[in-house]
Image (cartoon, coloured by chain):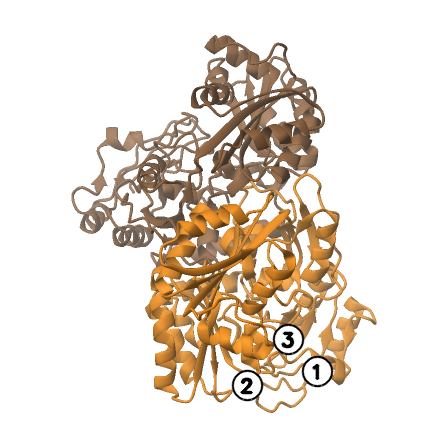
Chain colours: A brown, B orange
Amino acid sequence: VATPAASVGHHGPVVRPTLAPDLRAELEEVLGPRGLVTDPDVVAVHTVDWTGRFRGSSPALVRPASTGEVAGVIEVCRRHGVSVVPQGGNTGLVGGSVPMGGEVVLALGRIDDIGPVSGLDGQVTVGAGATLGALAAVAREHGLRPPVDLAARETATLGGMVATNAGGLHVVRYGPMRHHLAGYEAVTGTGAVLSHLTGLVKDNTGYDLGGLLCGSEGTLGVLTRVRVRLLPDPAARAVGLVGFEALDAAVAAVAAWRRSLEGLEAAEIVLRDGVELVLATSGDRDPFDRPWPVYVLVEVAGDDDPAPAFADALAATDGLGDAVVTSEPGPRARLWAIREEHTTAINALGAPHKLDVTLPLDAFAAFCVEVPRLVTSVVPEARTWLFGHVGDGNVHVNVTGLAPDDDRVDEAVLELVAGAGGSISAEHGIGRAKRRWLHLNRTPAEIAAFVAIKRALDPDGILNPGVLL
Amino acid sequence: VATPAASVGHHGPVVRPTLAPDLRAELEEVLGPRGLVTDPDVVAVHTVDWTGRFRGSSPALVRPASTGEVAGVIEVCRRHGVSVVPQGGNTGLVGGSVPMGGEVVLALGRIDDIGPVSGLDGQVTVGAGATLGALAAVAREHGLRPPVDLAARETATLGGMVATNAGGLHVVRYGPMRHHLAGYEAVTGTGAVLSHLTGLVKDNTGYDLGGLLCGSEGTLGVLTRVRVRLLPDPAARAVGLVGFEALDAAVAAVAAWRRSLEGLEAAEIVLRDGVELVLATSGDRDPFDRPWPVYVLVEVAGDDDPAPAFADALAATDGLGDAVVTSEPGPRARLWAIREEHTTAINALGAPHKLDVTLPLDAFAAFCVEVPRLVTSVVPEARTWLFGHVGDGNVHVNVTGLAPDDDRVDEAVLELVAGAGGSISAEHGIGRAKRRWLHLNRTPAEIAAFVAIKRALDPDGILNPGVLL
């Protein structure tokens, strides 16, 4: 790399780095003609995250077609002292897959094969670059579905989802990606290939390297293939929208339903101001005769229509205001739209600061009351929009009316989260965006353990430098 | 340690090691009078595993009462170059908690507090030394149960269960211990305290140290507290015993039930010779009019009686011979006894070699046919007894008629397992017993990664030396 220009901040100007001739020749030998891209226009597409907040630069995009080629790339780059940023669908929110220091971008898109689905246990081995949508299509042919679902499904890749331990909508029932990982293949920072694609659930033959790579944000190894468990797709679904007078009643109700409703697949919270914004944008009518301060959208699935059991659970719920429940696909989608259109409606007010955090359930209600006050105390003209996965304590804190580079509100909110025992990153990870606040959640001893593990698997620090640590 | 006598083999004579006076004084200062035990008779109880196969020796038993005392012990021992074997209930099968090299035994029994059960998410923080039985008693008061159940419940501790990633009977539905770990507190080999007891399911703020410690067999850190998720205890249960003519039909049937029966909690396989042995021992009558070569014991749970749905699933099962299904507690227990009494009945023939392995489901039936032939080809007078958790591919291979130290059959069976893509350790881990065969399942690159991680968290190698690596 002739000019390894480090960008200044998130938007700093950069001199485009170029590949040294000998490095180029060695990469070409590993990758063949299709695998090495230096056309600046093509490379540029891979140097910006989808929010536009992180803009880096890179001398080259490498597109290996196999685990062996990934190992070759890592060996060559390591020898030349050049760092690498692994990139899947590049749909993260924390700048974890963007070359902010002039790194080579290693895109996994060509390793996208989806293997046969095992009829006995529903497992499948998937190339890291396969999208969630492509996997879902294969799963559907077998009456199955991927274990994690999320909005970016047509772009997000399985490798990225494992590397960030993605969660999505159904964590309340099935847990995050880590719980569904039945095997892995990855290349560490030394170029070593770790492959354990056995798919055995009961397997205690050493440290859980798969679970360690899962959520490591590309800093310990480049995932090349993963073996995941597909889940049965229940035949029947019911969706309910439930109005509450108070947040704590909503949290308690969801906790009770988790125990009484075996098929509870999602429990999403939205607040009155967000619902009003969505209804004003869409023109849809309010499902209730009167406004409620808090709404919970619930999906229950089962082999038979779960609506009767759900109605029983609602009848036993304390503090409930009103509820609509439907098993019909059209009305179900209309209820879901009230939750799902929050993102678009809020974005239309101007790019929000988005903080994806988790609170302990017993601190959830108080946090949701406190955070808008805190935000306006820091920036009076800012406005807070809250929605999220109340079953897991996961809140999406969206703040509009802030300058893009104004981090004061982010810092205040994350301090509030950590002070309440919460996590500053529910999903997406720490990346570059939250690195300066990692200490809010992790002790020096824990961070020292992270650094020691990083050195163990990537001794030269060439994998995703500046991310997480 | 004046005489750090290493035992020869599993049973070698040992000279009892003693504590150097300055080490003793420093440990006394950390632990107080109750925490340091050097009485040989008391120490001796902690130097033998429950199978009697591993007999070590130790200069001292330390019984810390807090995480801080554990950290103090590790610091003192590290400074003196003395190794430590963490010990929970000492119910493992692979010699992973026995001081075979004259190590100090660090027993967690005094750290056995069980915290309040969260009404919102059913989580509880538990001292590593609390037994599964004690946790189950607390859980019952809340209508809940521990996420993992196993036969040694009155002795096995939560710390040991996490350190070995225990699975037990219900893995087919709920997964192993690692899936239920919501927080951890541990002391690494440097004396550093890693504490992350947040209980947040959506929490991506660095590497998954909890998952890494889980299954690490005490070689990376000493777990002192764990936060685990308790599960709702379904109101109704049905148990069935199903006879099959052939193993492959039984495997296929269980795979189909996993998809069609949401409440499938256990699927255990037993074979005719084992059932005959059990019935001859107990005097109970055969539940069927005729013998079947293969039986599957199934438990299904739900809020309502699951027997009708189970009957429907049986009616749709190919290759099924005969079945009895009951929802009544007494008859349920009698069916379970046919499976559970296998251990006692086989032990009565003379201490068996016990190999706990997992096969890929598509190799399970062929393995069960092949392994008895293989065993008699190695030792003609030996006899093989197979039973296990067919839902997970987990078989308990018991071989009677072998000399205790004759490893030829063990090696042949483990090679057969690995050759079929299986795991040489379904549960319990590698310990000392299977260390020489780790290479059957793990590549040199993977073992090098294990060693690098071990060095990262226990640079002087004082935690459970000789176990796993």
Q: How many marks?
A: 3
Residue of label 1: B44
SS for dot 1: helix
Label placed on residue B82 = 3
Of labels 2 and 3, the one closer to you? 2
Location of the N terminus of chain A (image quadrant) = top left
Q: Residues within 10 Å of mark 2 (few under 14, many from 20)?
A: few
Q: Quadrant of residue A366?
A: top right
Q: Check contact, mark 2 vs mark 3: CB within 8 A.
A: no
Which chain is home to disc 3? B
Residue B139 position, x and y percent, is: 70, 51
Give the residue type that dot 3 points to.
Val
Is B346 rendered above or below residue A281?
below
Is B445 placed left or right of B189 in the picture? Answer: left
**Res. A231 visible in picture:** yes
- B54 or B268: which is nearer to us? B268
Outermost residue on the right side: it is B33
The vertical placement of B351 against A254, above or below, is: below
In the image: residue B156, left or right of residue B412: right
Q: Is residue B417 left or right of residue A29?
A: right
Instruction: Compare residues A421 and B345 and report the one nearer the observer.
Output: B345
- The amino acid type, in three-letter code, at marker 1 is Ala
Mark 1 residue crowding within 10 angstroms, few (<14) / some (14–19) / many (20+): some
Distance, label 3 to label 1, CA atoms, is 18 Å
Q: Is residue A377 above or below residue A143?
A: above
Q: Count neighbours of disc 3 (C-alpha within 10 A) and say few if under 14, some if 14 to 19, many if 20 or more.
A: many
Give the residue pinned by disc 2.
Answer: B350
| Kind of residue indicated by mark 2 | Gly
